[in-house]
Image (tube, rainbow, N blue to C red):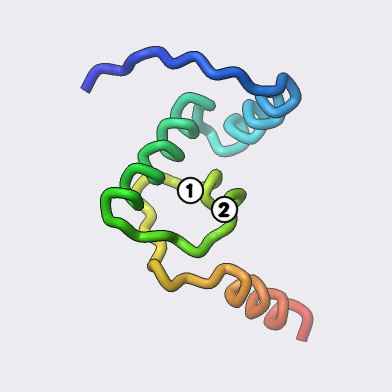
Amino acid sequence: MAAVSLNLRLEQTVIERMKEYAELEHTSLSQMVENIFASIVKSREKNVELNISPIVKAMSIDGIQVPADFDYKQELAKGREEKYL
């Protein structure tokens, strides 16, 4: 499928920070936005409401599946417990 241009209006600081993040992840800002949109469309098509924060959703990577019952807070607590106990 051919790529099409899309114009978005975002705060300059958000754009700059996301470009830095994209560079660290060795991807482009366009690819990150496309992955986010694709993730939203997929979850909507499956009629599944994921129980993860918007920040985690924003960091999603194409091809990684998160179970519908995934509790990121519980997993975060487990990780911290393992690290500090």
Q: Residue at x 54, y 18 (%)?
A: 8
Q: In this rendering, would 23 be left or right of 2?
A: right
Tell me, for residue 60, which label it has, or none: 1
> For residue 67, what is the image quadrant?
bottom left
Q: Residue at x 58, y 50 (%)?
A: 54
Up-down: is 14 above or below 2? below
Element assignment for label 1:
loop
Tell me, for residue 47, which label it has, or none: none
Up-down: is 30 above or below 49? above
Check disc 2 and report the residue beneath it: 56
Q: Quadrant of the N terminus?
A: top left
Q: Quadrant of the C terminus?
A: bottom right
User: Circles 2 and 1: CB distance less than 8 Å?
Assistant: yes
Q: In this rendering, would 23 be left or right of 66?
A: right
Residue 84 at x, y = what percent? 78, 80
- Going by the numbered disc 1, the residue's amino acid type is Ser
Question: How many marks on residues?
Answer: 2
